[in-house]
Amino acid sequence: MACNPRNAFPGTVYNNADRALDLYGDNIEVDYRGYEVTVENFIRLLTDRLGEDVPRGKRLGSDGGSNVLVYMTGHGGNEFLKFQDSEEIGSWDLADAFEQMWEKKRYNEMLFMIDTCQANTLYKHFYSPNIIATGSSEIDQSSYSHHADNDVGVAVIDRWTYYNLDFLETQVTSPTSKLTLADLFGSYDESKIHSNPGYRWDLFPGGEEKGRERLVMDFFGNVQGVEVEGVGGNETEWREDMRRLEEIIYRARARGNMTGAKKSETPVEEVIAPGRDLGKGRVEGAAKIEGVEAWGQRVLGAGALLGCALIWGGASWLESR
Amino acid sequence: MAQGIDAGPEDANFKVASSPANAQKQPPPESPKSIKTRGFVILSFWAVVLLLGLPVWLWTTSIHRARLPLQHMLDWADGKTCKPTFPLQITIEAPFLQEPEAAHLVRMTQHALDDLNEFSAHHLRLRLAKSFLSRDFQNASMTSIEDEYAIGPLTQFGNTDGLDEEALTVRLQPQPGAQTARAELQSHSTRLDVFYVSHQSPSVSSSSSTLATFIATKLQELFAEEQAIVAYILQSAQTMGHAPQISSSASSASREFRSRSHRSLNPELAARLDSRMTRSLKYAPTYHITVSLFTPSAAPSSWEIELALAEYFTPLLDSISGVSNFTVDTQVQLYATFSPSVHSPEYDAEQQIWTLREEDLSGFINAAEWPLSPSIGAGPTLNFVLYVPDRSTSPLVVRGSQASSWLIPQWGGVVILNPQNANATLNEATLLKESIQPALLTFSHQLLSFLGAPQTPPSLPLQLQTLTRIRAASLLLSASSTMGSLAWVTVALPSIAIPETVSSAVDTTLGHLRSTCEALKEGRFKDALENARIAEIQAEKGFFEKSMVGQVYFPDEHKVAVYLPLLGPVGVPLVMSALKELRRLWASRKAGQPG
């Protein structure tokens, strides 16, 4: 979008017509842009079903200790979100992709946020554990844009996104912020957003209560833990360790090389988020459930078809008389 | 033909004449031939639809799903197929003892060990050195203690027996004049020297011996950490038990096993192991190591890194190449500035040092501007950063602990290189390899902990052996759980295709898992690791098969909406004509029957 030739301010995306905050900043990295943003690529990214030639920068290198944030915004409707102008991702597609991620332990906790018309329908079908989902608007509700920038010629930001960003910019000021999801969700003002945001907690172990205690920075931050290797007290021990290692290395060198092992190209990636205890086990009963109404729908469809056939048959019978 | 056409109007005239009331003109009756032709036309249409259209439609819309041995895969994930055990072979060498005495000692030590051991999956097995049995006793007692002598024949014997690699050699030597026994672990070989007081050596008749207990305790101590790690790995695999139906049907045996391993892990140790496990990298066959020099000024602009690496780093990499491969590259980055969110170092006038706040260490690496891209090569990248502070802010240390190096879990390590003494300055154009040495040793230390090597037995060969076993166990479990995930995904998502490559990858994985399990049981740990590596790679390949992306989900409404406009206009004439034709046939048959 930033590099679209129709953008009057090349290389930038602003959250506001006052153009104070350039969302692209100085050093943002966009891995998928323009026509690379397809439903297939998105699902491949989530499930890591990518060819071996895809660089690691274009992969989601998460593992069982990672917290994943999925934020989607765009045009959408009941149980779908449009990608480009030609295709859309459905609620079931997302649910299945997340289930595969869960199966392969590609996330620890996930925060799913979506800003589109009827956004809350999009997380309806999720069935994998440890997901907190939130959306901007109920079914049959529109999600409105905040305002338009006349120089750019389009609406620059959606209302819900605007107030989310506003919260993050003004409240979450440092990487050590202790604000929780309850604070973030509590900041939503329906009179400003012009729609009713929805939340889904039932997939999260401990439900709403535990989910609300999650820190915003668990998902929006990339706080890397650090282990300082103490010198001070056990300096002698440390030196001893080092000396030993040195000796070992000399020995090893004297012994000469050992056999090299085989090469392989299976890429495995480093983790983004700090690791966390995952020993909670699988949530019981989190399985894909086909609703009973599916059968009802089928009967209805068959009935409609039959009805059409009957009308047609009746008409032709009348005509033939 | 021409006659037929001529005949038509005459017929019609005749009809009109015979029934003047019916003003409408009737079409001429069809000739039986044209009725027959029409029948054939309809039939041929139907034949094309049924014989060509339907198969093509089925063929093009069907999803190819290769058969997978689902039950086997789930059994592996469940841990039903394989309970990994780790029998460690320990050889006892007692050149100064009589054979029956030595054998008795070994038996008693084994007893004492079995009593000490709480974790049955990991146990130590003692045996008397074969070389001792075959060697002339007189000869042996006269030989001086030499490194190679003791190890040489033993390994030969091990090979000819086709037995497992031995984990440790315990060498018993009498020590005249000492009051208590003591043990000494060789830091560069797998040998434990035990010096005992001569009167401690047990007679054949005695039922207990301080020496046996002493050896058993020592051995137990040596392998305590490894046992704890193995128990931890197995336990975490258990508690992360796969699918709900599996955890509910978990056998009582595994539950008992779990509780037992729980007991052997005290919470403090478990927490430590936990932090170690999160720190260590996920297994990969190849790791990429980037050693970088960052400096905020223009100097040092070069370093003798190649020499230093060859001397201090490569030997270590070579010795762990059995576990993973490594590629190394280096870079120098001048004028590297901190990111603006980090507080700049503060001067501590008292100690004349510059300090960094510990909270800021996580932001020390300026990820946005320092070129530490993870996208080099195939494997995960480990970054080792050597930071040479500017002369004006040197020496630079972490406030409080005064440390100058730290470790970022799963990412890499950072070392701030300060001048060794106050007069020396590092900001010369070239860093000599001697000045890099301490940093590289720190990196080596960090590398080992990233790989998940234990820290306690202070002998690298022992640590590497332990690493082999730990890796084999964790790979076995992770490949098994991938199998379970794949089976589960296959069942849960009926709409994704499963190509034959997945099926063959699964077969390979299961095969190698089986050999891993057997190798573990027999104590062939290198073999086990080799198999487990292949299993893991194949399992990942199977799960992440590129073509296994679920086709975009279509609700039934969509299908109707696609097919109805197409099939409606085509189908209605087809069906109606077929019906008419059938009715005609029925009528003609009815008419024909009475007559």
Image: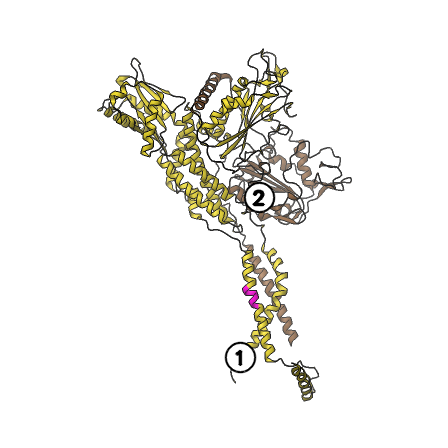
Chain colours: A brown, B yellow
Looking at the image, residue B121 sits to the left or right of residue A136; the answer is left
User: In which chain is the residue bearing label 1?
Assistant: B
Query: Residue at coordinates 31% horizontally, 16% vertically from top-left?
Result: B180
State the image coordinates of residue B98 (x, y, percent, origin top left). Answer: 24, 23
Query: What's under tag 2, amino acid-wise?
Result: Arg
User: In which chain is the residue bearing label 2?
Assistant: A
Q: Nearer the viewer, residue B377 or B283?
A: B377
Which structural element holds mark 1?
helix
Q: Nearer the viewer, residue A10 or A17?
A: A10
Residue numbers of the magenta segment:
B46-51
Q: CA distance from mark 1 to mark 2?
A: 62 Å
State the image coordinates of residue B595 (x, y, percent, origin top left). Answer: 52, 85
State the image coordinates of residue A167 (x, y, percent, origin top left). Answer: 66, 34
For the question of whether residue B312 can be seen, the reply is yes
Q: Quadrant of residue B522?
A: top left
Residue B153, placed above or below residue A130:
above
Q: Residue furthest left?
A: B205
Q: Are marks 1 and 2 on the same chain?
A: no
Query: What's under tag 1, amino acid-wise?
Result: Arg
State the image coordinates of residue B111 (x, y, percent, origin top left). Answer: 29, 28
Question: For the N terminus of chain A, which image quadrant?
Answer: top right
Label 2 crowding class (10 Å Cα cut-off): few <14, some 14-19, many 20+?
A: many
Residue B127, placed above or below residue A115:
above
Question: For the C terminus of chain A, which image quadrant?
Answer: bottom right
Magenta stretch holds residue A279: no
Residue carrying label 2: A44
Tags 1 and 2 touching, CB below 8 Å: no
Number of numbered labels in the structure image: 2
For the question of whether residue A209 can be seen, the reply is no
Which structural element holds mark 2?
helix
Q: Residue furthest right?
A: A151
Residue carrying label 1: B589
